[in-house]
Image (tube, coloured by chain):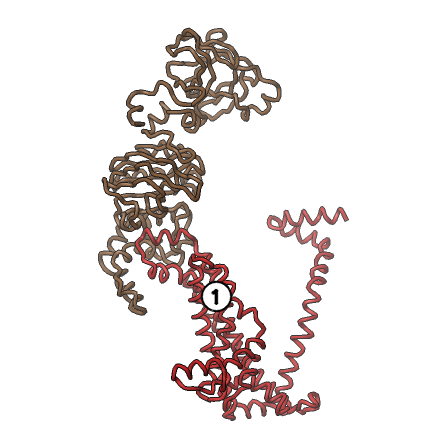
Chain colours: A brown, B red
Amino acid sequence: MPSITFKNLSKSYGSTPIIREFTADIDDKEFLVLLGPSGCGKSTMLRMIAGLTDITSGELLFDGELVNTLEPRARNVAFVFQSYALYPHMTVQENIAFPLIMDRFKGWYHIPILNSIMRRVLANSPDVRDRVTEVAEMLELRELMKRRPKTLSGGQRQRVAVARALVRDPSLYLLDEPLSNLDAKLRTQMRGEISALFRRVSKSFVYVTHDQVEAMTMATRIIVLNHGEVQQIGTPNEIYNSPSNTFVASFIGAPAMNLIPVTVSSGRTVIRDGSQAISVRCEQPDGDYLLGIRPEVIALADAGTASEAYVTSLEHLGGETVIGFQFKKPSQSNLLAATAVYSNHYARIPGRIELKPGSVQDFDINITAGVWFDEKTGQALNVNSEELQRKE
Amino acid sequence: MPVLVEDEKDVVHNSKSSPRKNRLKSHSRGFSRWAGYLFIAPAIIYLAIFLLVPFARGIQLSFTDSVLVNPSGGSFVGIENYANLVTSARFWNSLGATLTYTATTVFFSMFVGTTTAILVNRKFRGRTIVRAILTFPYAMPSVAVTLVFIWIYNQSGGILNRTTGALGLGEVGWLTDPSFGMFSVVATTVWKVFPFVMLVMLAALQSVPEELFEAARVDGADSLSTFRSIVLPHLMPTIRVVALLMTIWSIRRFEIIFLLTGGGPVEKTNTLVINIYQRAFSEQQLGAAAAIAVLGLILSLAVTVVFFLAERRENVKEGTS
């Protein structure tokens, strides 16, 4: 049941760095999600924790003990692969029992003929049988025990993969995008099942995904990665509400956080795109900033009472409406390709709102709920002190 | 023509949803149907002339007492050729030689081929060159290989006898001593054909998904268990097919045996194929030779049928049929 410590962990293939100086401390029994776009090094990170990939430099510690060179089995981890990696010629039962049989396998069992006999003896031994049955029951696989993986559906294979990981009662569960091959509905269901599993076994989980919904719903702690570098470590709430830089801000949320270029001079905030001023006074020193505002914080306002902008797109999601807008007057072609235009901002308004693209509308931008970013470095400026401490 | 193209498209689109409409439009497919036969015609004609006709002629010959100088001059003798065969010790010896040769050749070429495939599948310096060198024997013409081996096996001054002599093991008539004839022939054959097994096995080994090895590592399997539990079952279908091919080829192999021993010493390596050749071209008994050929064919067919039955049972077991 380890706490995991990463000390300046780096990985490079030849001269190409994949992970740079990864440093973090993860408590025992956390559900840690490694989140980032494809190619950010999150899977490599997970494979290093598992011991499937060598660590180039730095230290990886479980409960303060160096595990850099330990074989996967010695680390007592379980790994659920993205492709499930079920053994195709074994039945579900044999797949689940395999780690247990390997645990009890002795060197001299390798002698031909004896090999097959001992394998069967071990598979039929009461402790193996009972444990396999127990796990199969937990994951509702009892009816599928005699089937082979290729006759199973995606969701069933997923459950077998989890069962095989679960059966040895490891102290650390590593999951590499386990839901990415499932359809949307099944994914939602499996998300719930994995969360329930986490609560039931109460062990440490490390979960890799590029899906922010999975990260937000399942994690107790999230590490956002980009280009092999840690962008932010925090709870889902911290990641969502106080992103540490513009990358995290624009990666989390659908639509993502609006980044509005503004200029502050003596307490007056002016939107640079359209030169409208925001009426509320602001405490930031004079200069150029990116103002990060979540779409749901923005409200519609009556004409002349707030910041005037041009509506570029409308998406009705049933319960709410996502309104795309920009401060600069859009050209006709901008309107046609509205969602692709970079300068677009979004507001999420409850209910069904009818607006005409191209029309003028006032938006109430609540800067007290905003996050200020340095325009050049992209770093957040008024991150709270707790957050700063964690980053140290 | 444009109309035809239009119809073709339609047919393709509707081929699943409405077979009736499909049938109504089938007249427009007349051309393409005949075009299809046209394309396979050369192959069909070729097979008919060079395979089916000789095949039928062979069976017909086996019921006659034809001789080499006048193949069509023989008269119908019923099953006399077959009756003579099953009562002749020479035929049974020949069948035994075939089975011995086939079983040992298949076993050792499978073993050597698979083992080398596993070895050269590992990563090491110069792997590509080693793989290339190992495929040389298969690329060399059988006749050249055999001539080199005749020289190696040469009783006085052959490299093998000089080696055994120097080691104090004495010299052996590798191709003339009845106890060593079969060994020499099998060794030469294995050397010649194992690269084929190696190449196919190498391809099969490389198709084992990488995650399976990783899963096995996480599950705590050592390399032997990984091989036994993951690699070997993955190779089994390939092993079965290659073994079948090797069996059929061994039953039919001629040039290596003929050039090395010509069926000797004292008929120890006189396989069915060599026997057929001797009957037909040395003893000029075409009818008798044809009868052996038919029995040989039945042997090959029996092997194939047994193989496919085994394969089907395996599939049923895996639930894929």
In the rendered structure, the answer to whether residue A274 lies left or right of residue B111 reads right
Picture quarter containing residue A106?
bottom left
Residue shown at the point (49%, 86%) measured from the top left: B155
Counting from the top left corner in percent of width and height, residue A251 is at: 43, 29
Disc tally is: 1
Q: Could you say whether the residue bearing mark 1 is in a helix, strand or loop?
A: helix
| Residue shown at the point (58%, 83%) measured from the top left | B293
Q: Residue at x 30, y 34 (%)?
A: A24
Quarter of the view holding residue B71? bottom right
Relative side of A126 to A223, left or right: left
Residue B30 picture quarter: bottom right
In the rendered image of this protein, does residue A201 appear above or below residue B20? Answer: above
User: Residue B99's x, y, as percent?
Assistant: 47, 81
Question: On the image, numbered disc 1 is attached to which residue?
Answer: B198
Q: Is residue B63 visible?
A: no
**Could you tell me if residue A148 is visible in this image?**
yes
Q: Residue furthest right?
A: B1
Q: Dot 1, crowdedness within 10 Å: few (<14), some or many (≥20)?
A: many
Residue A144 to residue A276: above or below: below
Against A3, is B41 above or below?
A: below
The residue most toward the front is: B166
Left or right of A162 in this view: B236 = right
Q: Position of residue A162 (x, y in %)?
A: 33, 47
Quarter that holds the C terminus of chain A: top left
Given residues B310 and B13, the one toward you in this image is B310
Percent across and percent down for residue B274 are 56, 84
Front-most of residues A166 and A377: A377
Query: Which three-letter amino acid code belongs to the residue tagged 1?
Result: Met
* Chain hosting mark 1: B
Q: Quadrant of the N terminus of chain A?
A: top left
Residue A237 or A301: which is nearer the viewer?
A237
